[in-house]
Image (cartoon, grey):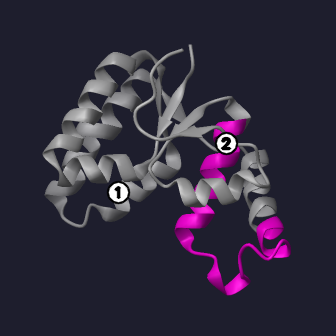
Amino acid sequence: MTRYVLDTNLYIEAARDRDRAGELKSFSSAFSPYLYLHAVVAQELLAGAVSAALERQVERGILGPYERRGRLVLPSYRAWRRSGEIIAALIRAKKLSLTGVRPSLLNDALLAASCRERGMVLITRNTADFQAIRRIEPVRFVEPWPVPA
């Protein structure tokens, strides 16, 4: 069965919209054995948890369950290195300017490189960045919510 990583934007949508929260909950319930949390997603979620209450929500509701099950994706040195190569290649191909490298794109390149390295599929609504990255790194990503083949 395919293993999946959920991108940060899906958790943010779920926090802001009840319907999106229901979609995420349904998918997570059905695919729980195949879902993993990427360290980049944990970082981004905690960076956005600007109050102690939000931080506790993120830790208890998202991070904790993955941590307890050991379903974590930690980028290797090779993935970190590859993420830098991806950004440099996009700049050389004039798909990106050196001054136009957003921190979120650096994170997306790392997410892409480590998902590819582990043979995982990223689920995201941020298709524009990952389509650009896929020109360099053949990362597998899909929009929510994939149905098993």
Most extreme residue toward the bottom is 99
Position of the C terminus by quadrant: top right
User: At label 2, which amino acid type do we have?
Assistant: Ser
In the rendered image, which residue does mark 1 sit on? 46
Q: Secondary structure at mark 1?
A: helix
Q: Is residue 19 left or right of residue 77?
A: left
Image quadrant assignment for residue 16? bottom left
Give the vertical position of 133 relative to 58 (above or below).
below
Image quadrant assignment for residue 3? top right
Residue at (17% x, 41% y) in the render: 19
Label 2 or label 1, whichever lies nearer to me, is 2
Residue at (77% x, 60% y) in the render: 86
In the rendered image, which residue does mark 2 sit on? 114
The picture places residue 56, in percent across and down from the top left corner, at 20, 49
Residue at (67% x, 42% y) in the render: 114
Magenta residues: mostly which secondary structure?
A: helix
- Give, as a single range, the part of the protein colored magenta: 88-116
Q: Secondary structure at mark 2?
A: helix
Give the vertical position of 136 relative to 14 (above or below).
below
Residue nearer the viewer, 11 or 129: 129
Q: Is residue 83 left or right of residue 3?
A: right
Give the vertical position of 101 relative to 29 (above or below).
below
3D distance between C-alphas at marks 2 and 1 = 20 Å
Dot label at residue 86: none
User: At label 1, which amino acid type do we have?
Assistant: Leu
The picture places residue 107, in percent across and down from the top left corner, at 57, 59
Disc 2 crowd rating (10 Å Cα; few below 14, some 14-19, many 20+) is many
Q: Is residue 138 left or right of residue 124?
A: right
The picture places residue 36, in percent across and down from the top left corner, at 48, 30
